[in-house]
Each structure stands twice: as C-alpha cells, then as structure tokens.
Amino acid sequence: MTVETPDMDELLRLIPTVTYGDNNPSQSVGVRGGALHLSAVLPALSSAIGHPTATPVHADPQACQRALGFPDVTSAIVVLVDGLGYWNLAMRLGHAPYLRSLMNDTANQRPIATCAPSTTVAAMAAFGTGTCPGLTGMAGYTQLEPASHTLIQLIQFKDALAPKPVNPHIPVPPMINPLDLQREPTMFERLAAQHVRVTSSGLPKFAGSPLTEAALRGSDYQGNVTPRDRVLAAARAARTPGLTYLYIRDADKVGHNYGWDSEHWVAAFEHIDAQLALLHRSAPKGTLIVIVADHGMVQTDMSQRVDIAEDPQLTQGVEFVGGEPRSLMLYVKAGENPEDIATRWRDRLGETALVRTQAQALNDGLFGPMDERIKPMIGDVIVQAAGAATFVDSRTQNDKATHLPSVHGSQTQLEMDIPCLIDVA
Ligand SMILES: [Zn+2]
C-alpha cells in the first residue's frame, strides 16, 4: 500500500471542523467532510442500489455516490467496525491480509470523516439517519435531558449519574424514549417505506436496544451469538436485492479495555479481518461491500490526564460535565456566563484543548445544521482534547472510566478519519 501514515504528533493535532453537505472536498487541501462523511454513506448506498433517498443533510444521494465511488449494484452490504479508525487500520495493516488487499486499491486510499463528537452514539445516529448530531439530538456519551434536568447516558438512555445497579444482568429501563429524543427517520425506515429490503445482522442483545431503536430502527434485525453466524446471516440476506447492515463491535471494546496498541487489540483486529474475508467469500457474486467505522482511537497519556474534580478553576460555575473524556459538554449553573467559564478553561488547559462556547461551536458548524429543540442538550461550553490528553471527573466517573487506555471523541485526525473501503464480491 502506498498510503503514508503521518507521524503521531500530526495525527493528534486538532483538525478544522468537518463540513456537512453533498460537495466533494477532496480537491481542497485540509477540508474534510461534505459527501466524504459517515453521514453520506447510507444516502450514497441508497443511490447505488437504485433507490436514491435524500435526507435533510444530504439532498443529492447521487452526488454522494459519485464522491464516495460506489458502483451501481442490486445488493449492498455495509459493515460498521466500531472503533476502527483509518489510521488505526493503516498502522496495523500487516495483521490483516484481506483489509490490506483492499487498501492496495487507490480508490480506498482516502479516509472519510466521522461526525463530532467522534463517539459511538453520535456517529451511529448520524450514520443511521444520514444527518448530523444537530438534528438527531445524539451529541455525546452523556448529555443533558432538559425536561428532567438530568444527565443521561445515550448507550442505554439511562440516568448517567445514578448508582450502579445491584445486579448488572437486569437491564435498566431507559429513562427517556429513544424515539422521543431521536426524531429523524432512519435511512432504514426511509428505504423500507419504498419496499426495499433492509436487514441488520448483529448481536441478539442489541436487537431492540435503545441505541438501535434511536439510530438504526426500521430494518429486519437478525441476531446471532457468534461472529461467524452474523457474517453468514449478512451474506445470506444479500441474495435478495436491497441493503444489509453488519455491525462488528470488538475493536472498540478491546481498545477501551486494553488499548488499541495492545496485543489483545491486534488479536481482535486479526479476527475482524478474518470475518470480513469470510463475508467477501460468502456474499453473492456482484454484492457491493462497504466497510466503515464510527471513529478512530487514541492511546491516552496519563501524564496529560486532568481530573476536573480536583481543580476549582475548572469546576467553578459548572453544574454538569457531560460528553466524554476527549470531548466535554459543560452545562453552566444558572446566572453564570459561559464566556467566563470558557476563558477559565482556556487559561487552565492551554494548548491541550480547544474550548468553544456553544455559540462559537455552532458558528463553526460543529454539530451540523441545528434544530432549536437540540440546543439545550449540547452544553454551554464545548471542550475538545488535543494530543493524548483526557479530561475526567472523578466525582461522577468510576476509576475504570477515568483510566481508559484508549479513548476517542475529539477532533484530531486519528479520531475523525475513518475508512470507507469498497469491495465487490
Ligand atoms: Zn464506537
């Protein structure tokens, strides 16, 4: 492969805020997004399978298809590999013969962008609806739920600050209805309404999960326990014209537990490559296979870790700290001026963070087009980590959460650049 990986200092530098829309920014140096964005993948695939379906962010699915380079087909499988950023992939390609063969193709030697924040819930919803966090209302691992004035966690839609349940095997009922928060129709719903077959293949426990309901509802969900069965279910579904979605979790899970540069991660990555190779062999001839991710991963540096709880300059005037350790949303106490808080945080964190008030972040288009309903959810001050820094809060996060070896969420190249690999079986 001829892709040259930038050095780590460059990969950990903050990049300009990505854009939303249907234009192809590949000719403009330093510009990311437009049609080369995770939110454009399903609109582009809808066009590729002959049912071009627009969204409020992507009005021209054909333009997205052209920009992403998808051929016309009758059946397409899109695989989302959680946490497999473009540069994480590029740096470990020696372990992945199938992915390496795809990366030899010049068409695949370009990353596309994920959304900000570069985190699972926000990216899944932007992907699933073909829109952006400003419209889906899914803008961070945790965020304010304005009606109850509580911080909610958007994987399970539960109270983020509630004590851990006594029995972790009994699922906590969601605090809010996922359909009430995320009101954009999903691309699966839009396609199913046109009588297009839409199938999801994933773990049985995610079939009706709040995150699936919010971001990816509307498909025929096929749950299987083993990775092999999930791959084969996707390949079988692809025999009928339409769209198939396959979710692969382990790169993210193992990355959070052991670090993306660990041997455990490499083993998981090798296993993922084998699953994708099996998909290539099992899918009907002529099926389009597109492989994307929701974000990349950054190895944390504990010497650059800041505990907000121990720093009065950071806690002053702040009621809730939402988001995640690489991308915070600060909710100010009544009567406080967000600009004052932003100034204190800038003074304290210096070069290690980009601190913007909500008005500045929206002016930069950080969350894409913004629905007024969503504004109270996203925080008065947005803080994004540069380098390998993390900003944790030991008042509300447990020891494991404040010491994760690998994380994501911010606006660096390593986190924002994702693969969009094209294969035809
Ligand atoms: Zn993820």
Image (cartoon, helix red, strand yellow):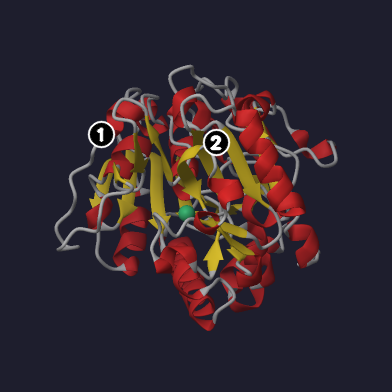
Q: Do the residues under discs 1 and 2 have CB atoms within 8 angstroms?
A: no
Nearer to me, 140 or 276: 140
230 vs 172, left or right, is right
Nearer to me, 219 or 165: 165
Nearer to me, 394 or 118: 394
Query: Which percent across, then down, holds residue 63?
Result: 65, 27
Q: Which residue corresponds to the image point at 72% horizontal and 58% vertical from the top-left? A: 12
Q: Which residue is mark 2?
A: 39
268 vs 218, left or right, is right
Q: Which residue is mark 1?
A: 176
Figure check: 342 above or below 414: above
**Cα–Cα span, label 1 and label 2:** 25 Å
In the rendered structure, which amino acid carries the disc numbered 2?
Answer: Ser
Furthest-top residue in this view: 372
345 vs 319, left or right, is right
Nearer to me, 226 or 214: 214
Q: Which residue corresponds to the image point at 56% horizontal and 71% vertical from the top-left? A: 260
